[in-house]
């Protein structure tokens, strides 16, 4: 196999489309922009943006290391999957030895840069990696816990984003992050059941413990909790405007949740949340408008 083909297979194995999940690390910067933005001197905000962007790259590398590990562990199961059998390791277009060496090099880079950014950021990154390793070998076989671990990874990213730039962040945002991640995680489990039908348990043993009805009930509870938690955040967080104008962003969250439910139930999407977010234009526009409105409110109406 040529060098170009090997690099191409490594890039596919790294799952660049799933790096969008790591964008959650920017939340702390977005929702504390009123503490950093000064029209006369934007240098502080620029510095923080550069720092968070470097942290984003670190988590992308860590995520890719985990994806390599997952592909190695699930090699035989992926070969039986209608879609995952085309992954480079499962298809045989990438040698396991090459994937392992690349992952080790990526880890070394992550360790060196993380310690330079912030020691606590390095600790969070190490804890995230260890949790993902535990997930790959044990936790993904535990019903409900498997999705809670995925949600914890999102929360850890949000925490890392706050730590690396040294800003306080409302506990409500952590709650909303966890609930949103649970919403996506259980929606993905539901789609896996629908896609694989009777062969679901052969690909992922934990799917034996789930059923579409159970998942629909869990998703319904999480949907309500997410909307309520975000609504409470908009008028109770300390760093938000006192006139509660942040509540104007609630409709964007409502539409985003309902749109995703529509895609899951009516379009059989949801098996790959990152692809849904990138391909569905109404949902992507809604997210952009939510972020833009939130930032504008925080800058114009300071607490």
Image: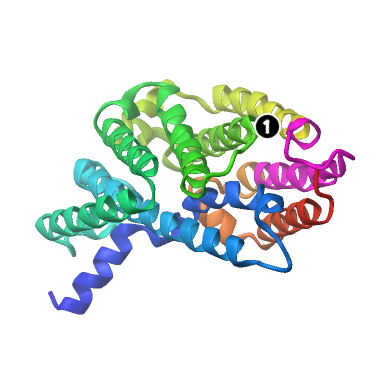
| Residue 56 occupies quadrant | bottom left
Relative depth, front residue between 179 and 106: 106
As displayed, is residue 123 above or below residue 92?
Answer: above
Report helix, strand or loop for mark 1: helix
| Residue 42 occupies quadrant | bottom right
Q: Does residue 299 belong to the magenta stretch?
A: no
As displayed, is residue 52 above or below residue 156?
Answer: below
Residue assigned mark 1? 226
Q: Position of residue 95 (x, y in %)?
A: 12, 60
Relative depth, front residue between 202 and 101: 101
Q: In screen coordinates, is 93 left or right of 209? A: left
What is the magenta range?
A: 233-262
Quadrant location of the C terminus?
top right
As displayed, is residue 3 above or below residue 90?
Answer: below
Q: Residue at position x 68%, y 55% from top?
A: 287
| Residue 46 occupies quadrant | bottom right
Q: Position of residue 57 (x, y in %)?
A: 40, 59
Q: In screen coordinates, is 80 left or right of 3? A: right
Q: Main secondary structure of the magenta part?
A: helix
Colour theme: rainbow
Q: Position of residue 123 (x, y in %)?
A: 33, 38
């Amino acid at each position: 196999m040529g060098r170009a083909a090997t690099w191409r297979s490594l890039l596919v194995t790294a799952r660049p489309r799933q790096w969008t999940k790591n964008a959650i690390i920017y939340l702390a910067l977005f929702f504390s922009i009123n503490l950093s933005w000064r029209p006369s001197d934007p240098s502080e905000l620029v510095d923080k943006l550069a720092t968070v962007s470097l942290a984003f790259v670190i988590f992308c590398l860590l995520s890719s290391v985990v994806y390599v590990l997952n592909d190695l562990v699930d090699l035989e199961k992926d070969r039986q999957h209608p879609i995952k059998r085309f992954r480079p390791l499962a298809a045989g277009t990438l040698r396991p030895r090459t994937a392992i060496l690349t992952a080790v090099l990526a880890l070394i880079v992550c360790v060196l840069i993380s310690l330079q950014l912030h020691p606590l950021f390095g600790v969070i990154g190490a804890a995230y990696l260890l949790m993902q390793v535990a997930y790959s070998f044990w936790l993904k076989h535990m019903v409900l816990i498997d999705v809670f671990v995925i949600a914890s990874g999102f929360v850890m990213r949000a925490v890392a984003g706050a730590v690396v730039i040294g800003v306080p962040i409302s506990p409500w945002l952590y709650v909303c992050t966890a609930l949103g991640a649970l919403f996506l995680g259980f929606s993905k489990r539901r789609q896996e059941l629908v896609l694989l039908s009777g062969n679901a348990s052969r690909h992922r043993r934990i799917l034996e413990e789930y059923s579409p009805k159970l998942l629909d009930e869990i998703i319904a509870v999480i949907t309500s909790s997410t909307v309520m938690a975000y609504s409470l955040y908009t008028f109770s967080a300390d760093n938000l405007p006192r006139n509660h104008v942040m509540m104007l962003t609630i409709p964007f969250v409502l539409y985003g949740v309902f749109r995703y439910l529509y895609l899951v139930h009516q379009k059989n999407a949801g098996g790959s949340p990152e692809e849904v977010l990138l391909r569905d234009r109404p949902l992507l526009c809604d997210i952009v408008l939510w972020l833009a409105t939130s930032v504008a409110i925080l800058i114009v109406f300071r607490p």
